[in-house]
Image (cartoon, grey):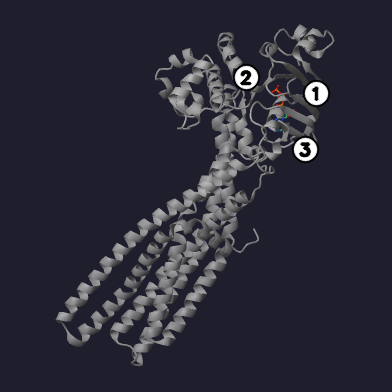
Amino acid sequence: MSKQPFTRYFALLARYLRPQLGSVILMSVLLLVSIGLQLANPKVLGIFIDTTREQGLSQSLLWLALLYLLVSFLNQGASVASAYLCEQVAWKATNDLRADLLTHVLSLDRAFHKSHTHGELIERIDGDVNDLSNFFSELIVHMLFHLVLLVGMLVVLSWIDWRLGVCMGLYCLIVVGVLTWMRRPSVERWVVAREASSSFFGFLGEYLSATEDVRANGGMGYIWRHFFQRFSRWYTTTCHAGWSGATPWIISQALFALGRVLGLVLGAYLWSIGLASAGTVYLIFVYSSLLMQPLDKIQWQLQDLNQSTSCIRRIEALLGTRSSMKDGKGTQPAAGPLAVTFEDVSFGYDDAEPVLQHISFHLPAGRLLGIVGQSGGGKTTMTRLLFRMYDPHSGVIRLNGVAHTEMKLQDLRRRIGLITQDVDLFRATVRDNLTFFDREVSDERVLQVLEEIGLLPWYQALPQGLDTMLGAGGEGLSAGEAQLLAFARVFLTNPDLVVLDEASSRLDPLTEKLLERGMERLFTGRSGIIIAHRLETLQHVDDILVLEHGTVVEAGRREDLANDPNSRFSHLLRTADGAIVA
Ligand SMILES: Nc1ncnc2c1ncn2[C@@H]1O[C@H](COP(=O)(O)OP(=O)(O)OP(=O)(O)O)[C@@H](O)[C@H]1O
């Protein structure tokens, strides 16, 4: 944040333009050629005028006219080619930046994602970067282009007469200085406008993902109210930021008119003292009028730069956000089923309210643990800690004796398979949803897995087999079918520990039966944790852990606890009739 704007621009440009240095050089050369040609054309016209005065109609005039046409034609050609290259360079640079931002956002912890809605993040990854496409291509190159054009014209004017160069040079400095100074406040206004746009899209994303619930519960009035509030804030802040450029524009037009008058007066003066011909006076007038073009462009580009600066600030802030979780050194627990040990683990989503307190237990490798407890007792939170969505405030979690913080996150999540009630499905084929778009997984392997877990009848009922397309959010599948798909998905990844978080809660008894055989296979040769509300789901587990208000109140072998009339588990079995009573 403390870095100067130019250092920031340079760092960003260097990072994203370096890979396409060849195109950037070619683009700059074409722009330079175009500058040269734009400077040459008035000169040709000036000579044309002087030749007409000195020689009347002659052969040379024809050649000069042809030369003028040729220069104009080449200039157009160079402009088209450079515009094409600019687009290409901008696309590549912005896409690389989008990819970096996405990778960074995905690496951030859950606390970050909890405090930023999906819509807001999309707007920050795409919206902010979109506004930078001009910055990566035309903005800086065109700014340089117009600056070089400006300097070129001043050099030509100085070459005609040094006093001309000095006067027009001073004039240009004053114009650029005044305009830059006047546009300063608009950076802050663009920052506010960009924030308002993120907030609007964040709200929209949240609403769209909850459309069904909002409609079913009559929440449309609330939604419209907030929609208009956020939309009008976005609209007014953007107008405000845009209009902050209007006053400098009016002043710039007055300054440009003054510049033309200055050129004309200086030309007339040089002609009156015999230092300039009629052609040269024409040249002076054309160049001093042409000076307005780069000055005008530069002032608009300064406006764009303000907008880009606000985007760069937000991008830097996002890239500067660090995950509170550090990736491990890469220690690997021994291969095979994972033993899970919680050693005095405590955690709370915020410091004031502990959710888990001094949790300790050991699940030997290859065994199946069932966790039961009241709603809000902290069962899901335990799985989140196991997965390193969050890190415990104190205590250690070990897998086969290795602290899970020592493992690479990628390895950790590869070795643990998680199935929850909420299955995330994509608008893609059943195959892609099962394999997570991994082309390495063959259809044979997918079918083998479906057969192993008893899902072949389900697969055979699909209209186009693995090519059956699912709608957004898994449309086309019932909640139960989506869960079956999640089971198959985990099976395909072949983890060493499987965690089911109330995963079979949406299955009807018939489908659940169908899956029972599959579950048996799923847990063979692996460790497992089942979090269940219905005790029936825990019939086949080896051990039980009862969690209440974030503490372990009972733990032991299922058989022992079920046979002990004083245990909480047996109490639950007697009273709950299949469902846990809070
Ligand atoms: N992302 C979160 N941010 C803040 N608090 C949370 C978050 N998730 C859960 N909590 C709180 O933590 C406590 C434990 O929640 P958790 O989901 O772990 O319980 P649970 O035992 O799995 O409940 P259930 O059986 O209803 O799923 C609850 O009080 C809940 O409100």
Whether 495 is drawn above or below 188: the answer is above
- Badge 1 is on which residue? 552
Q: CA distance from mark 3 to mark 1?
A: 17 Å
Q: Is residue 237 above or below residue 512?
A: below
Image quadrant in which the C terminus is located: top right
Real-space Cα distance between discs 3 and 2?
A: 31 Å
Q: Position of residue 252 (x, y in %)?
A: 47, 68
Quadrant of ligand 1 in image: top right
Discs 3, 2 touching: Cβ within 8 Å: no
Please tell me in which quadrant of the rendered image residue 244 appears: bottom right
Q: Earlier in the sequence, mark 2 or mark 1?
A: 2
Q: Which of these two is toward me, 48 or 357?
A: 357
Q: Which residue is mark 3?
A: 393
Residue labelled with disc 2: 523
The answer to whether residue 575 is left or right of residue 334 is right
Q: Amino acid at mark 1?
A: Val
The numbered mark, 3 or 1, whose residue comes first in the sequence reads 3
